[in-house]
Amino acid sequence: EDWFSKIEVGEIWGVGRRLAPKLHEIGIKTVWDLQTASPSQLRARFSVVMEKIIREINGTSCIELEEINPPKKQIVSSRSFGIPVSDLASLEESVSLYISRAAEKLRRQQSYAGSVHVSIRTSPFNEKEPYYANGMTIALPRQTDDTRLLTKVALWGLRRIYRSGYKYQKAGVMLSELVPRQYRQLDLFGSVSAADTQSSKLMSVMDQINARMGRGTLKLASEGFKQPWKMKQGNRSPNYTTNWDELICVLK
């Protein structure tokens, strides 16, 4: 009672600045005032959410927490380049890398994608260079989670929106029309081909090796190897708790 009497009612999650003035009008100014108020009366005056908040304050769990994040409806992967990029080859490497990252997330949530969106743009803040931005969405003939097929489609779209003579600053991809693996739309005869089974096994092995040996251990050659265009990460904090090679070293 002592602590709740000192805390302003607007500090409660679900009340905030919008509802606090209305509660002040009926004499509820602190958490203690709200805790001792009538849940049914405030429900009639405000909403069922207010009733749940009061019951939560009194120790009755009413507002569920999401213990497991729901599957994403879209998966986006995009980055700014460390240096301006003008040639198509470098853009193809970046798009291949971003598709690979997005496909990993797609398989992790056990989904399939029905379309791929690819986009590129120059810097909107560089007034000395001409501005260009474009994007393209490609519907897939069959839903898939195969990195190879998704990359092939993304690169097909990239080549159609690319224009030479510009210094590009950013590229990105987005996987949309996602469906759970068990609800994947099959062909007319509803059969899973041998190629689908082989693709699933290959992607599973690829993910397992990369998870065990490190990201990028197995990758498509189209992602490139030197990747001079990658985002600069010189000021990134070391992964002290997740990477053995970046543990803090204490010297005597």
Image (cartoon, rainbow, N blue to C red):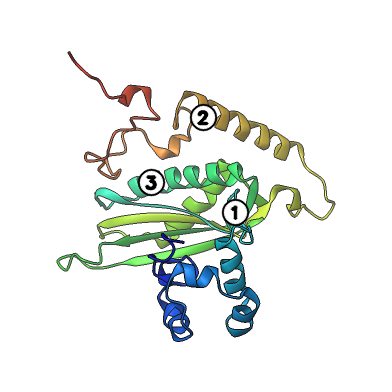
Up/down of 213 relative to 97, above or below: above
For label 1, the residue is 66
142 sits to left or right of 91: right
Q: Nearer the viewer, mark 2 or mark 3?
A: 2
**Which label number is shown at residue 53?**
none
If the image is split into quadrants, where does the C terminus sit? Answer: top left
- Amino acid at dot 3: Ser
- Which comes before the other along the chain, label 2 or label 3? 3
| Alpha carbon distance from label 1 to label 3 | 34 Å
66 sits to left or right of 171: right
| Along the line of sight, the residue nearer the viewer: 177 or 109 | 109
Q: Quadrant of residue 55?
A: bottom right
Label 2 packing within 10 angstroms: few (<14), some (14-19), many (20+): few
**Which label number is shown at residue 94?**
3
| Alpha carbon distance from label 2 to label 3 | 21 Å
- Amino acid at dot 1: Glu
- Looking at this rendering, what residue extends furthest in the left direction? 128
Q: Residue at x 43, y 82 (%)?
A: 24
For label 2, the residue is 211
- Residue 240 image position (x, y, % from top left): 33, 30
- Which comes before the other along the chain, label 2 or label 1? 1
- Residue 144 image position (x, y, % from top left): 64, 48
- Which comes before the other along the chain, label 1 or label 3? 1
- Amino acid at dot 2: Ala
| Along the line of sight, the residue nearer the viewer: 105 or 45 | 45
Q: Residue at x 33, y 22 (%)?
A: 245
161 sits to left or right of 70: left
- Residue 184 image position (x, y, % from top left): 73, 52
Mark 3 secondary-structure assignment: helix
| Along the line of sight, the residue nearer the viewer: 53 or 211 | 53
Up/down of 63 relative to 203, above or below: below
